[in-house]
Structure formats: structure tokens, C-alpha cells
Image (cartoon, helix red, strand yellow):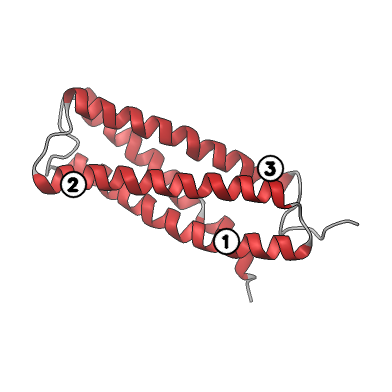
Amino acid sequence: MIDIAHIHPMLVHFPIVLFLLAIAIDFWVLLKGEDLAAKTCLPMIGMSALLLAAVAAIAAASFGDIALDKAIALGFDRGPLERHGDLGLTTMWVLIGLSLWQGVAHWRGMRLSGGMGWAFFTASLLGTGILLTTAYFGGELVYSFGVNVVPVLP
């Protein structure tokens, strides 16, 4: 049976890849001068990828809390664990916020093109920075500290 603390590292790849896919699609749509909130194929795929990234981030954060509790119970240092957890929650909220922004624009028939589209894209790039920082510190937990992979040494 799989350890429930190992589900978090399995899930974290989904929001990462889906968010990067959404950003790549959004970039292409904006380069073509189109609207990110349009009801056409490519903007809809980008918006769907972003929404799925947000849902996957919620799942990853939920299982991350379980993994955090287990790591603390095993004696791992709380500081690096909480830094990664706080960044993870920030990433999750950024993805939810971007999904809501694009979803409301789409639903209400507002345009996300031109300056507003590039503002959305810039916010997405800032979100990418947070996401990659979260991923870096998560990797550090595993590869430098062996969190939930190796036993704590006295």
C-alpha cells in the first residue's frame, strides 16, 4: 500500500505542467493578437489548462499538509517544511486567482487582449516565478534533507 505522504510528490507535477502549458498557449494567443477570454479553441484550451492547474494545486496542497504533518512527526526541521508549505499555498491562491480572472472575463464577455491580455500574461509570469520557487524548495526538501524519503538521523 502506498504511503499517503507520497501522494503529494506525485500530484505536484500536474499544476506545474498545466500552468506552464496555459502560459505557453496564452503567449501564442496574445502574439497572434487574439483575446484570451474568447470562446474559440486555443483560448479555451489555455483557460482549461489553467483551471485544471488550480484544481491540481488544491489537491497537491491538501496532500502536502498531510506530508508536512508526517515529516514533522518524524522529526524533520519545521522551518524548511513551512517555507515550502507557505509558498505552495501562495502558488495555489495565485492559480485560483488567475483562473477566476480569466473565467470571469470569459463568462461576462470581457476582453483579455491588448494591454489587459498582456497584464494577465505578466501576472501569470509572476505566478510562474512563485511556482518555480515553490518547486525548488520542495526539491530541496527531498534531495537535500530526505524528507519523507529517508529516516531522520539523530
Q: Quick check: 101 left or right of 60?
A: left
Disc 1: which residue: 65
Tag 2 residue: 104
* Secondary-structure class at tag 3: helix
Q: Secondary structure at mark 2?
A: helix
Q: Is residue 105 left or right of residue 67?
A: left
Amino acid on which the number 3 mark rests in the picture: Glu
At which x and y percent is residue 73? 74, 65
As drawn, 101 above or below 152: above
Q: Amino acid at mark 1?
A: Asp
Classify the position of the N terminus by image quarter: bottom right
| Quarter residue 139 falls in | top right
Q: Position of residue 26 (x, y in %)?
A: 27, 34
Residue drawn 33% across and 45% down?
A: 97
Q: Where residue 140 is drawn, which disc sits there?
A: 3
C-alpha distance separating marks 2 and 3: 37 Å
Q: Give whichever of discs 2 and 1 has the lower sequence position.
A: 1
- For the residues labelled 2 and 1, say whether their Cβ atoms are less than 8 Å apart: no
The picture quadrant where one finds residue 35 is: top left
**Labelled disc at residue 100:** none
Q: Residue furthest left?
A: 109
